[in-house]
């Protein structure tokens, strides 16, 4: 059934909670499959959210969802790859040199604009988005029903044949259904802001993300936008930040000034928004789906920002789940545990190995090692591009074994 704008009372095929990238991609896929879908979004856009550096695999999903052209029209900064910096050492990856045949570039996106672009496009296609409308309770006994407060404060019981939770950091169904599980990663935190006036490298190098290793056990991201602003943030365990005094802005300024590459690039920048603090953002769930619902994007598991995997995993989960929702609505028997939960886990686990091996120093040994085999570099580059389901890549197939093995080879070559 196709719900109309401002109609929360009819039964839709699918109600999507949240209009971030996971929610709008899901809505676009389901709409293209001719299902009646509505989106409920607690805020009104544009709204700030962190998560600004995309990976090439995002382009595949945006294209399949029919959303790529709308994003292209925004003229975002082209991101050709990533540069890791540690003291005087450099390790650059260029997405054009990947093992996987996929997109060779992507974008750096100010999320307020990116998310609004996706939601505008989904509304233009005919999907109603109910702004300032929050989900407060859920029941899956019988017809899936969400209790909702709309923009005027009125309450509704919103019924649908299926519910997709794309509420990101809101984690609506994980909280309401008791699915939340602690992450197996340690608690980390981040301070970040947007700045103006950074000294960018020229030409093709301008759009690369910089990941600078701080000498005292943190890393700093530098993400340049085409609007002249640059996103800057630092990530570490809370005790690292306790070692700096003052306001969040004073702490972030001191952290940037004490890492030579960031200091050289960012000296004299103006901070264009209040410094934001996020802590303990890694999260997990006991299951990604149940009778009448599934979770996509950050409402599922969020690992860590270091390899910019969040939006890619959000989009991939929506594409994968949308096909299964469609089959479920048609009455097919769907094995969600295998075809969704296990599928997503296999890709997320590749990033989990990379994240864990980044923080224990193993990846640093490979990235900054003396000799780099071009084939291995291409395999690493494909993981960094988000192609973590490409089983032809040995680093995807055997990530847990291969990454420490590569570090040993790098160590031996160094000895
Ligand atoms: C420090 C940090 C840096 C990061 N950097 C990157 C990066 O460079 N690249 C990257 O890809 N990812 C990054 N991420 C991850 C990224 O932020 C998320 O993965 C991404 O935003 C997930 O998208 P989503 O659509 O699942 O959720 P969101 O973008 O969070 O969207 C969820 C939407 O649901 C709405 N909502 C919430 N509760 C309710 C409710 N009760 N009712 C209705 N609506 C509701 C919210 O208002 C929101 O608009 C970073 C994360 C952190 C913590």
Image (cartoon, grey):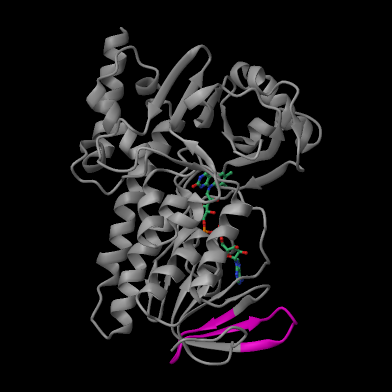
Instruction: Determine the residue positioned at 40% across, 63% down.
Output: 318
Q: Position of residue 20 (x, y in %)?
A: 55, 61
In depth, the one of 63 and 17 nearer the eye is 63
In depth, the one of 45 and 183 nearer the eye is 45
Q: Is residue 244 left or right of residue 134?
A: right
Q: Is residue 139 magenta?
A: yes
> Where on the picture, by quarter, is residue 202?
top right
Q: Position of residue 14 (x, y in %)?
A: 45, 80
> Where on the picture, by quarter, is residue 320?
bottom left
Q: Position of residue 399 (x, y in %)?
A: 27, 38
**Residue 295 appears in the picture as rendered:** no
Instruction: Determine the residue positioned at 47% across, 62% down.
Output: 22
Ligand number 1: quarter of image: bottom right
In depth, the one of 240 and 55 nearer the eye is 55
Quadrant assignment for the C terminus: top left
**Residue 265 appears in the picture as rendered:** yes
Q: Which residues are magenta?
A: 137-156
Quadrant assignment for the N terminus: bottom left
């Amino acid at each position: 059934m196709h719900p109309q704008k401002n109609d929360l009372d009819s039964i839709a095929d699918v109600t999507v909670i949240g209009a971030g990238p996971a929610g709008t991609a899901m809505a676009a896929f389901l709409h293209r499959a001719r299902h009646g879908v509505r989106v409920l979004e607690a805020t009104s856009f544009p709204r700030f959210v962190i998560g600004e550096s995309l990976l090439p695999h995002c382009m595949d999903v945006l294209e399949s969802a029919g959303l790529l052209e709308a994003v292209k029209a925004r003229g975002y900064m082209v991101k050709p790859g990533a540069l890791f910096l540690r003291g005087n050492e450099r390790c650059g990856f260029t997405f054009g040199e990947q093992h996987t045949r996929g997109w060779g570039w992507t974008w750096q996106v100010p999320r307020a604009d990116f998310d609004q672009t996706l939601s505008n496009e989904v509304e233009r296609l005919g999907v109603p988005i109910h702004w300032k409308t929050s989900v407060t309770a859920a029941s899956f006994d019988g017809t899936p029903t969400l209790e909702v407060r709309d923009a005027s404060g009125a309450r509704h019981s919103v019924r649908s044949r299926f519910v997709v939770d794309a509420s990101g950091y809101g984690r609506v169904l994980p909280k309401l259904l008791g699915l939340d599980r602690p992450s197996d990663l340690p608690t980390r935190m981040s301070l970040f802001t947007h700045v103006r006036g950074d000294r960018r490298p020229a030409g093709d190098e301008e759009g690369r993300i910089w990941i600078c290793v701080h000498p005292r056990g943190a890393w700093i991201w530098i993400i340049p936008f085409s609007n002249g602003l640059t996103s800057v943030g630092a990530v570490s365990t809370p005790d690292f930040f306790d070692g700096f005094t003052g306001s969040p802005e004073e702490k972030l300024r001191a952290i940037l000034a004490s890492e030579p590459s960031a200091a050289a690039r960012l000296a004299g920048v103006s901070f264009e928004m209040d410094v934001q603090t996020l802590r303990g953002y890694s999260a997990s769930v006991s299951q990604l789906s149940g009778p009448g619902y599934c979770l996509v994007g950050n409402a599922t598991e969020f690992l860590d920002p270091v390899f910019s995997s969040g939006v890619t995993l959000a989009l991939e989960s929506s594409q994968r789940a949308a096909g299964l929702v469609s089959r479920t609505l048609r009455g097919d028997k769907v094995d969600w545990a295998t075809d969704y939960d296990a599928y997503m886990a296999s890709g997320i686990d590749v990033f989990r190995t990379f994240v864990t091996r980044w923080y224990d120093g193993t990846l640093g040994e490979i990235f900054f090692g003396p000799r780099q085999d071009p084939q291995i570099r291409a395999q690493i580059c494909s993981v960094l591009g988000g192609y973590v389901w490409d089983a032809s890549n040995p680093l995807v197939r055997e990530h847990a074994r291969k990454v420490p093995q590569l570090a040993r080879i790098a160590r031996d070559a160094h000895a």
